[in-house]
C-alpha cells in the first residue's frame, strides 16, 4: 500500500439527507446492465467465517456482475469456506487474529490489495451485490466513502433483531450528537471507499470485532472524509446464524464510541 495521502482539512461534509440522494440514483451509473470499465477496477473485500453454504452464491453473483478483483479474508473457518473460495479462483488470505474488524483491517493493509474503489461486503448473502454499482457511482461522483444505510428511504432490513435495531439507533443518536453527523445507520458493513480514504483511515483503526464499522464511520468524519449514505436493502442471511452477540458486541461498540470521543 502506498504512503498515506494527506488532504487539506475542511472537506468533511456528511451528506445523508434525502436531497443528497441525487448523487446516488437507483438503476443508473455503472449500470446494472452495462459495466463501465472503471467499475472493474473495484476490489471487493469479503470477510468470512464459516460461510461454506453462502460464499458460492455471493462470489458467483459478483462475477456475473463483472467484479473480478475479489479478496476473501477468512477467519480460520472450521468448514470449507476458504477451500471453496480458492476453488472459485478468488484471492483468499487467512486472517492472523480473530474477529471481523481484525479481518477487515488486515485486508486494508494487505500489500496485494489493488483496486480503486475498495468495497467491503459480507459473505452471508444478506447484501445485494447489484447495490455496489450505486455505491461505486457515488464514489465516482466525489464521495470518499459511500456507505449503505438500511434506514433511509429506499432501504430496509430483514436481518435485524429488535435489540439490534434499538442498539443501532442509540449509537446513531450518540454519534450524531457528538460529531454533528447525520448518519442513519452505523453497524452495517456494506460500503465503498476511495483507495485514498482507506489509506487515510487505516492507521487510525483498532477494532477487532463488529465495532469496526462504527469506528470507520466516526473516524471518516474526524479525518474530514466526504461520506455519503446510499439506501440499501439487507435480506436475511441465507444460511447459518449471525456471529454477532447483541449485548457483548453492543458493549464493544459503545466502548469504541466513547474511546473515539475521549481521544
Ligand atoms: N474473517 C472473519 N470474518 C468474520 C468474522 N466474524 C464474522 N465474519 C464475517 O463477517 C460478516 C458479517 O458477519 P455476521 O455473522 O453475518 O454478522 P451480522 O451481519 O452483523 O449479523 C460475514 O461475512 C461473516 O462471515 C471473523 O471473526 N473473521
Ligand atoms: Mg450477516
Image: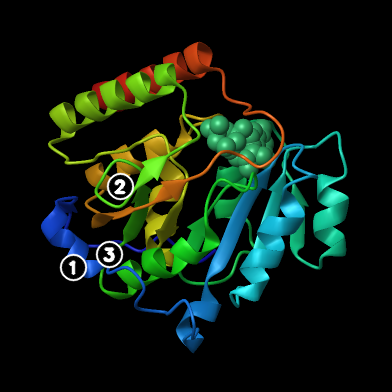
| Among the two numbered marks 1 and 2 on one chain, the one whose residue lies closer to the N terminus | 1
Residue 22: which numbered mark, if any?
Answer: 1
Q: Quadrant of residue 57?
A: bottom right
> Which label sits in the foreground, 3 or 2?
3
Q: How far across and down, in percent of the image, does residue 56 sit?
A: 76, 56
Along the line of sight, the residue nearer the viewer: 240 or 187: 240
Secondary structure under tag 2 reads helix
Taking 26 as reference, is 117 left or right?
A: right
Q: Which residue is mark 3?
A: 143
| Among the two numbered marks 3 and 2 on one chain, the one whose residue lies closer to the N terminus | 3
Q: Quadrant of residue 77?
A: top right
Tell me the residue at 70%/33% (across/down): 97
Along the line of sight, the residue nearer the viewer: 10 or 247: 247
Q: In whole angstroms, how far apart are the C-alphas of marks 1 and 3?
A: 13 Å
Q: How far across and down, in percent of the image, does residue 210 sit?
A: 51, 30
Q: How far across and down, in percent of the image, does residue 168 sit?
A: 35, 26
Q: Which residue is mark 2?
A: 220
Amino acid at each position: 500500500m502506498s504512503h498515506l495521502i494527506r488532504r487539506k482539512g475542511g472537506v468533511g461534509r456528511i451528506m445523508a439527507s434525502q436531497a443528497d440522494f441525487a448523487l446516488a440514483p437507483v438503476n443508473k451509473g455503472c449500470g446494472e446492465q452495462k459495466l463501465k470499465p472503471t467499475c472493474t477496477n473495484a476490489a471487493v473485500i469479503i470477510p468470512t467465517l464459516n460461510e461454506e453454504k453462502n460464499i458460492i452464491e455471493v462470489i458467483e453473483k459478483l462475477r456475473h456482475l463483472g467484479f473480478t478483483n475479489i479478496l476473501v479474508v477468512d477467519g480460520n473457518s472450521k468448514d470449507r469456506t476458504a477451500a471453496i473460495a480458492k476453488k472459485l479462483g478468488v484471492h483468499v488470505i487467512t486472517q492472523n487474529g480473530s474477529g471481523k474488524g481484525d479481518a477487515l483491517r488486515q485486508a486494508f493493509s494487505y500489500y496485494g490489495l489493488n483496486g480503486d474503489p475498495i468495497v467491503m461486503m459480507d459473505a452471508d448473502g444478506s447484501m445485494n451485490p447489484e447495490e455496489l454499482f450505486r455505491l461505486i457511482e457515488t464514489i465516482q461522483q466525489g464521495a470518499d466513502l459511500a456507505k449503505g444505510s438500511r434506514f433511509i428511504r429506499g432501504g430496509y432490513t430483514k436481518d435485524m433483531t429488535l435489540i439490534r435495531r434499538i442498539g443501532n439507533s442509540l449509537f446513531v443518536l450518540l454519534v450524531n450528537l457528538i460529531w454533528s453527523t447525520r448518519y442513519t445507520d452505523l453497524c452495517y458493513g456494506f460500503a465503498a471507499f476511495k483507495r485514498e480514504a482507506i489509506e487515510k483511515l487505516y492507521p487510525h483503526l483498532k477494532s477487532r470485532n463488529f465495532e469496526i464499522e462504527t469506528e470507520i464511520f466516526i473516524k471518516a468524519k474526524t479525518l474530514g472524509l466526504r461520506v455519503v449514505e446510499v439506501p440499501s436493502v439487507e435480506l436475511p442471511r441465507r444460511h447459518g446464524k449471525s456471529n454477532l452477540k447483541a449485548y457483548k458486541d453492543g458493549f464493544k461498540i459503545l466502548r469504541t464510541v466513547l474511546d473515539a470521543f475521549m481521544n
